[in-house]
Amino acid sequence: MTWWWPNTEEDGKEYSIDDIVEKSAPYIHSGIGYAGIYFLIDCDEIVYVGQSHDVKSRLSTHSNSNKNFNKYYFIKCQPEELNRLEAYYILKFRPKYNISLPKEPV
């Protein structure tokens, strides 16, 4: 399989950890029902990167898990981009709760 990293934002800009933390919102039991990549944040640290076809629904399951976080951020994307973008951001930030890392792109 050949990996390639698509544009990670509509304007083609790549997100940095500072961009994500700065734009994050406090976690409350609500969210957006879009497909996307989400970042769980504790203080100023990205502690988990995940993907979902329904971010709102997925965030609520994390609120009942053993993952400590107080904010989140998400990047809306097309469902066919979920795997690539999630792998990219897991490899980039290496969050502590993402135990299984994706393979490096070739």
Image (cartoon, rainbow, N blue to C red):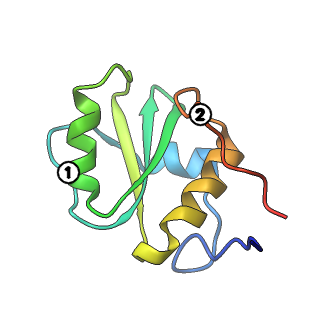
The answer to which of 71 and 103 lies nearer the viewer is 103
- Is 78 left, or right, of 104 in this rendering? left
User: Residue 13's x, y, as percent?
Assistant: 64, 71
Say few, some or many: other residues with alpha carbon within 10 Å of mark 2 (under 14 / 14 to 19 / 20 or more).
some
Is there CB contact under 8 Å for labels 1 and 2? no
- Is 65 left, or right, of 93 in this rendering? left
- Disc 1 marks a residue whose amino acid type is Ser
The residue that appears at 24% across and 30% down in the rendered structure is: 63
Q: Residue furthest left?
A: 29
The answer to which of 106 and 76 lies nearer the viewer is 106
User: Which residue in the protein does label 2 denote?
Assistant: 95
The residue that appears at 62% across and 46% down in the rendered structure is: 90
Say above or below: 7 vs 86: below
Element marked by disc 2: loop
- Disc 2 marks a residue whose amino acid type is Pro
Q: Quadrant of residue 26?
A: top left
Say above or below: 4 vs 14: below
Quadrant of the snapshot with the N terminus: bottom right
Q: Residue furthest right?
A: 106
The label shown at residue 57 is 1
The residue that appears at 29% across and 34% down in the rendered structure is: 62
Quadrant of the snapshot with the C terminus: bottom right
User: Residue 9's x, y, as percent?
Assistant: 54, 72
User: Residue 6's x, y, as percent?
Assistant: 64, 76
Element marked by disc 1: helix
- Is 3 left, or right, of 18 in this rendering? right
The residue that appears at 46% across and 25% down in the rendered structure is: 43
- Is 33 left, or right, of 39 in this rendering? left
Q: CA distance from mark 1 to mark 2?
A: 21 Å
User: Residue 64's x, y, as percent?
Assistant: 22, 26
